[in-house]
Every structure is written in C-alpha cells, then in structure tokens.
Image: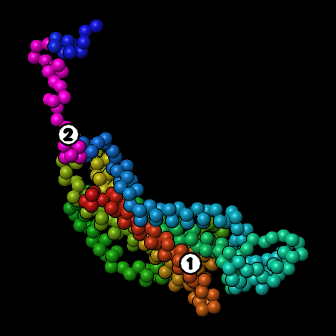
Amino acid sequence: MQSDNTVYRRRQLLSSQIDLSKFNDKNFEKATEDEKRQQDVMGESTTFLKDGLRRLRKNPLAMGSICVLLLIVAIIIVAPHICPYSYSQIITVNGVRDKRATNLGPMEFSKLEMDYMEETGEKLFPHLLGTDSLGRDYFIRVIYGTRVSLSVGIVAAIMVLIIGLIYGSISGYFGGMVDMIMMRIVDVIYSLPDMLIIILLSVVLKETLQPAIAGTALAKLGTNMISIFIVFALLYWVGMARLIRGQILSIKNNEYVLAAKAIGTKDGRILRKHILPNCLSVIIITTALQVPSAIFTESYLSFLGLGVSAPLTSLGSLANDARGAMQSYPIRLVVPAIVICLIVLALNLLGDGLRDAFDSKLN
C-alpha cells in the first residue's frame, strides 16, 4: 500500500491539495494568545436563551435569589400537608373551641391542649408562630398569606405581559396615526391615580359583583381582590406597552424585516417570528421586575384594608391585623414583614440578574 505522501505527490494538475511531504514542524508557528482568544470567541454556536442562562449562572446574587425563592415555594407547598391546621380554623380540642388558645407565643400550648395531651398521651402539632387574637394558628396563616401574595404577583405580571405585549406590538409596528392614537390613550391612563381607582372600584364592585360571585371560587378572593386584578389589567400594562413599542420602532426598519415584507409575509408572522424574538430580553426583564412590584402593591393595599377579604389572608393583611398588638406581640408584624422583604428583594435581585444576563447592550 502506498504511503500518504506518495498519494499527495500524485495529485491532479491545478489541484489545491497540499503536499505534506514539503512541510515539517519548522514550517508551522504556534498560535499566539490573540489567535487563541479569537478561537474561543469563535466557539460552538449557542442560542440566545442558553447564552443568557450561562451568564445568569455566573451571577451569585441572582442564583442566591433563585435558591431563596425555591425554598419559599417549597415551604408554602409542603407546609399545609404537614401542619394539621387551616388558615380559618379556630383551635378546638375534642370538638370544643379552646377559648384560651388566643395570643399564644411561638411553640406554646394552651392549658386545655396541655391537659388533653397529659390525659391521652397524644402529642399535638405545635403552634410554630403561636396563635392570633381569634385562636387561629399563625404559622399556617403566614403560609397561606405568602401563597396569596405570590399568586397575585404572578397573575398580575402575566396580565401585564399579555396586554402590554399586544398593545405595544400593534402600536409600534403599524406606527403613524395608529401609533399616535394608541399612545395618547396610554398618556391618559398614566394620568389616572391608581389608588383612587382601586377605592372606587372596590366600592362599586362590592355591590355588583358580590351577588354574582356568591358560591363560586371567586367568592374566597372577595370583591377587593378582584378589583385589584381589574386595576392591574386597566392601569399597570402601560409601562410594558411603551417598552415593547420602543423596541419595535428600532427593529422594524432592519433589513431582515424589510425583506420579509418584500416577499409578502403577513404582518402577524413578521411580528411573531422576526420582531418579538428580538425583544425577548426586554420582555423577560420587565416581566420579572413586575412580579415584586405587584406583590408590594397588593401588600400595601391589603395593609390599608383594600386587599383580600377575611378569612382569607395575605401578607399585607396580616401586617395590618398585627398593628393593634404591635407592642404586645411584635412577632405578628415582624414575620410577614420579613417574608415580604425576602420575596421582593429576591425578585428584584433576580430581575437585575436577568437584565445583566439578557440585555445585549450590557454584554
């Protein structure tokens, strides 16, 4: 069998094949550091999402925030299956209401509970954070309050995302008179005082919605909570719409969009396939930062008595209920306040991390 060098020497005329026999180690130079770095830059291709997640994993604050949020979510999911009490359940012993089980401290039992454990030898589940003024376990109320606050934040962020994305896309893409009219509507909505609108809606909807939602799942939320969702749908999407509009205005005149128009691609497909994917960083960042904003809004509205209706609770309403006994039982105010701070701080740090990871202008 012929050697490889012989094969290369018998190449065809005008062939670009290299004759390796003419080369040795002295003919090659080692790559410089700049050439090696260039090879790193020209590494394997990746997607926008994978590249952003890779940068996100290098951010210790963002990863710590994710761990805190996952821990909180795990607790609010698992705790109701372990704790035998309900958020609206008043402590009873042998089917009899325990009137002395009010305002208990952390890990305390009432006298009736202690007598019951001595007589039967049965160990009752402790009140981890004590009880409130009505004799309800405070730990499970904090758990359900965290559930409600997180649910409000996530639902509000999704509502803002959907409405703002559709409205901003239409306004920015079509431009002209359509854009001018739609943006003037946004300016009018910006001028509305959201607190006043929530109060007015709470008063009006209480009379109209209460009979309609009676006996349904919405009855647990109450008219105040429904009015908060309506206000989010009416007022809080304008910031998202403006950001999406600004991004589309800067993207829609690019060559690939003009090429898609030239071959007759429909406007809806251009928006879905060519424009909105290039706005993904703004969409992710704004949605992530909307969640803590919505949680904080719900908390201070519940603190003012405009949030969820009793017996359902949220972190804001728990803090509001604890005001009267702040000096005697400060833990009732400290615990929901700490949970609110942890959730809002973790979500804000995560939003900042997402901005650093996905915003191409910062990388």
Q: Quadrant of the N terminus?
A: top left
Residue 112 drawn in magenta = no
- Local packing at callout 2 (Cα closer than 10 Å; few below 14, some 14-19, many 20+) is few
Residue at coordinates 15% horizontally, 30% vertically from top-left? 26
Pick the front one: 316 or 7? 7
Which secondary structure, mark 1? Answer: helix
Residue 17 seen anywhere in this rendered image of the structure: no
Residue position marked by numbered label 2 in the rendering: 31
- Local packing at callout 1 (Cα closer than 10 Å; few below 14, some 14-19, many 20+) is many
Tell me: residue 23, above or below residue 184. Answer: above
Tell me: residue 103, above or below residue 229. Answer: below
Q: Amino acid at mark 1?
A: Pro
Residue 194 seen anywhere in this rendered image of the structure: yes
Q: Amino acid at mark 2?
A: Ala
Tell me: residue 158, above or below residue 51. Answer: below
Q: Residue furthest right?
A: 119
Pick the front one: 131 or 287? 131
Residue position marked by numbered label 1 in the rendering: 336
Q: Quadrant of the C terminus?
A: bottom left
> Which portion, as a residue range, is magenta?
11-38
Residue at coordinates 46% horizontally, 79% vertically from top-left? 198
Which secondary structure, mark 2? Answer: loop
